[in-house]
């Protein structure tokens, strides 16, 4: 394994946490070394050294909740070996237990996560947990057989062992649960390092899953979580001998750090999904679909619509369709007022303007954004929107707020060119509303995104309103795409020469 540069990794991960912003303040009675009070991994919250960790007695944890990475990974390795003994049927039953437990607890867990993170919408937090049944399991791992004059060959999907996974604060329990289903289906155990702002939610779900699995199958610690995640625990997961594969859901810096760890990494990186509406679109349907995607969980989804490019000939009718569909329109002055709160605009090198996102507004309700814009009677609106130019921070930044900038463009090809620029080459997600097949084809080729939705909401790209399956990790950076159990499996080949063919 390559040796990781500790100073570089520490600097990169520190930058990650600064980019993500501090989680909500801890309650008054929270311990001072809790992840909420030390989001950047201060000395008070730092994990013990490797020597201290290894001196701790026993495995040091129960039902998957650990203070130390070395103990969590050792326990996960032991659980992995026990899972192997249960075979595919054992994996299948684990997945059933996880899905049943998640759905049964969707409402209290959704409330708990919202109270911890203070971002998003309760109804959508609950919904994300209720739909885990759409995540595929062992049925995706059918073997591949080849037969010919020289004999037979069988290829099967085998586990890596123990996977180290990083969770985002935006979807702590849903991402954990989706990863568990896919990874256990492939036969793996997991050690999670959650974002500090969602660590308590991850602990809650991990403990419940392990209790249910142990009660029925006699295996504990198949799913492990670091109770107080820090920079140091992330570093230790990257280096731990039991960790065979890394799975990352996060921004560019944490993805970069994982890819420099010397381990193979499956990385779900950033996105800034764009939408194009041409002059052949069904405008009312487009507006309804766009609002549904952009407003879901207050636009925390990585696939959620973040900006819309509309050809001039239908621009005003489209804006009216958005209002009819229930979104609140902001005028230029109101957008300017909101922008001064949502971004810190400064002058960078060469005199170029730079915009730093106000993390306190991530995932807040649309009515709060409307208030900052000077509208105090927005009521229960799910989304605010308004016209901007293509260079506006709301277009160029993955802002994760229920505010949708609409850009007027002279023609379709200009719309696609500007949308491609705003997507920043992440090759994550894009949407088109059109009945022109040539336009659909042109944009699909130009954008080259992992997910491309035609005439639907962005969430249709994950099988929610469209055909297909669900996954909470979309590995755009490393190219695996929408993750499935196959993503977390090795292909092994067995060859029998000249025999067993019966034809």
Image: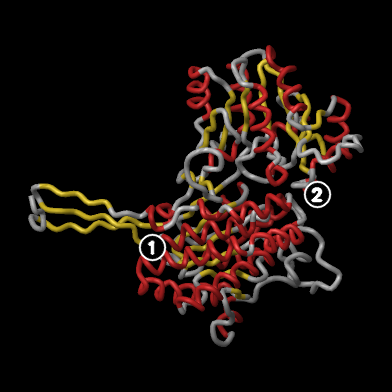
Residue 153 falls left or right of residue 335: left
Kindly indicate the quadrant of the structure image that contains residue 398. Answer: top right
Res. 159 mark: 1
Residue at the spot 7% in from the left edge and 55% down from the top edge: 498
Residue 467 in percent (x, y) is at: 48, 39
Residue 308 in percent (x, y) is at: 67, 27
Task: Give the SS element for disc 2.
Answer: helix
Q: Which of marks 2 and 1 is nearer the N terminus?
A: 1
Task: Give the SS element for disc 1.
Answer: strand
In the rendered image, the vertical position of residue 298 relative to residue 152, given as above or below: above
In the rendered image, the vertical position of residue 492 relative to residue 319, given as above or below: below
Residue at the spot 49% in from the left edge and 17% down from the top edge: 438
Q: Do the residues labelled 2 and 1 touch (CB within 8 Å)?
A: no
Residue 260 in percent (x, y) is at: 52, 54
The CA span between labels 2 and 1 is: 40 Å
Please say whether residue 190 is visible from this viewpoint.
yes
């Amino acid at each position: 394994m390559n040796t990781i540069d500790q100073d570089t990794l520490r600097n990169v991960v520190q930058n990650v946490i600064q980019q993500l912003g501090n989680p909500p303040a801890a309650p008054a009675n929270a311990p001072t070394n809790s992840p909420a009070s030390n989001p950047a991994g201060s000395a008070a919250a730092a994990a013990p050294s490797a020597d201290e960790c290894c001196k701790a007695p026993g495995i040091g944890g129960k039902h998957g909740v650990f203070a130390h990475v070395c103990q969590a990974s050792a326990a996960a390795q032991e659980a992995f070996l026990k899972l192997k003994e249960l075979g595919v049927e054992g994996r299948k039953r684990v997945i059933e237990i996880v899905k049943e437990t998640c759905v049964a607890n969707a409402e209290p867990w959704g409330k708990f996560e919202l109270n911890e993170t203070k971002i998003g919408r309760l109804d959508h937090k609950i919904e994300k947990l209720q739909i885990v049944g759409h995540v595929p399991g062992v049925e995706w791992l059918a073997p591949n057989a080849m037969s010919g004059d020289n004999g037979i060959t069988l290829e099967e999907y085998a586990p890596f062992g123990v996977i180290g996974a990083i969770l985002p604060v935006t979807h702590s329990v849903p991402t954990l649960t989706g990863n568990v289903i896919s990874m256990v289906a492939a036969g793996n155990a997991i050690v999670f390092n959650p974002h500090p702002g969602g660590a308590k939610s991850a602990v809650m779900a991990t403990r419940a899953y392990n209790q249910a699995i142990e009660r029925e199958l006699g295996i504990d610690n198949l799913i492990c979580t670091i109770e107080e995640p820090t920079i140091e625990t992330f570093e230790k997961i990257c280096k731990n001998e039991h960790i065979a594969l890394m799975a990352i859901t996060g921004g560019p810096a944490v993805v970069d750090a994982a890819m420099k760890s010397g381990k193979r990494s499956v990385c779900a990186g950033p996105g800034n999904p764009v939408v194009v509406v041409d002059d052949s679109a069904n405008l009312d349907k487009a507006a309804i679909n766009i609002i549904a995607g952009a407003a879901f969980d207050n636009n925390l989804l990585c696939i959620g619509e973040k900006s819309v490019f509309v050809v001039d000939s239908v621009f005003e009718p489209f804006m009216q369709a958005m209002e009819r569909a229930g979104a609140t329109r902001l005028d230029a002055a109101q957008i300017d007022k909101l922008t001064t709160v949502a971004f810190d605009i400064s002058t960078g090198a060469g005199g170029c303007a730079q915009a730093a996102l106000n993390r306190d507004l991530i995932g807040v309700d649309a009515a709060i954004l409307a208030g900052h814009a000077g509208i105090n009677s927005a009521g229960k609106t799910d989304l605010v929107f308004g016209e901007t130019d293509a260079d506006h921070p709301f277009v160029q930044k993955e802002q994760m707020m229920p505010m949708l900038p609409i850009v007027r463009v002279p023609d379709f090809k200009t719309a696609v060119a500007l949308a491609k620029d705003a997507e920043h080459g992440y090759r994550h997600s894009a949407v088109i509303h059109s009945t022109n097949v040539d336009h659909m084809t042109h944009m699909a080729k130009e954008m080259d995104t992992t997910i491309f939705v035609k005439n639907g909401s962005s969430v249709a790209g994950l099988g929610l309103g469209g055909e297909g399956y669900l996954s909470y990790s979309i590995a755009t950076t490393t190219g695996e795409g929408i993750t499935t159990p196959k993503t977390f499996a090795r292909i092994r080949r067995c060859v029998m020469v000249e025999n067993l063919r019966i034809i």
